[in-house]
Image (cartoon, rainbow, N blue to C red):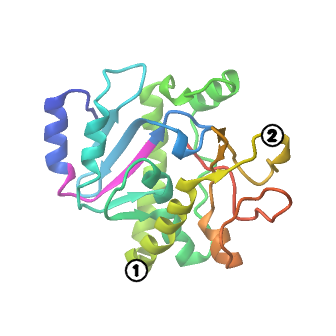
Amino acid sequence: MSIIDTENQYRQFHKKFRNEDCIFLPILSDTKAHPQENSISLIYVSFLKDNDEYILPFNHSESANLPIEFYWNLSDCNNRKFTYDKKLLLHLGKFKNVCDVNFLHYMAVNEPLDIFEIDTNAHRFFNLRYYNKNDINTIIPILKQLEYCRKLSIVLQDTIKKYEQYLNFSYNNDVLENLQYIESNGLQTLNDMHHNQIQPTYLLHQIYLHMVFYYHLFYLVLQTNITPHNGIAGSNPGNIIKPTCR
């Protein structure tokens, strides 16, 4: 495993990255905020050809952080990038040739890919001890972030090997990119709207400058065959839920 925190290291990494398929996992700074109002803490990359692993920090207390422009540069590469949540990734940059492995699993067996048991002792400790702190992922040790990402990467690689015949980039792009576009626009709220007027059982909400951003689960959208909507004032928010933002 290599931590890329200098420009020379990044240039060498970029040469490899643009030519090889990989597991690509973004770690957000804040586990509670919607990706539209979040920032990237680090990314984990595991190349499928040789299993080489890399951590690229952009906002973390333990390392020298790379300029955010280096992150944007990765979005132009045409290599295949397999991630757990394509929609989350698209909020952080318009990446090309991205496969959502959760979506792949759903298309194969009609169930979302369950990763909620994947955890580390450090993540449990920090999330329990500092549950009110913003940007918690910026202080969880990088090696513990690596441990989490390795566990998730194994699950994703096993899913790809098992269900690759169900891979359909056209459908993957049409469904998820349209949902991400809907989410990115948010919903304008009334000036006197309070948090208790929104049903927290069904959705993650962030009110900022009278805008609310929601997170739509694609498999509930597909099951109900409805257009995503806001879940305010009694409308049915069945396809809106809190994301996993590790």
Residues 126 and 73: in front is: 73
Mark 2 residue type: Asp
Q: For the C terminus, give its image quadrant.
A: top right
Q: What's the distance in space between the residues labelled 1 and 2, CA to CA?
A: 51 Å
| Magenta span contains residue 43 | no
Tell me which corner region of the image, top left, top right, bottom left or bottom right, holds residue 121. top right
Residues 145 and 217: in front is: 217
Describe residue 150's horizontal placement relative to residue 242 as left or right.
left
Task: Give the residue at mark 2.
Answer: 192
What number is the disc on residue 191?
Answer: none
Q: Residue at x 81, y 51 (%)?
A: 201
Is residue 246 among the parts visible in the rendering? no
In this rendering, is residue 56 above or below 244?
A: above
Describe residue 204's horizontal placement relative to residue 35 as left or right.
right
Q: Residue at x 34, y 21 (%)?
A: 63
Task: Give the residue at mark 1.
Answer: 165
Residue 87 horizontal/vertical position (percent): 49, 58
Callout 1 crowding tier (Cα within 10 Å): few <14, some 14–19, many ≥20: few
| Magenta span contains residue 18 | yes
Residue 184 horizontal/vertical position (percent): 53, 54
**Residue interval drawn in magenta:** 17-26
Residue 103 horizontal/vertical position (percent): 52, 68
Give the mark nearer the N terminus: 1 vs 2: 1
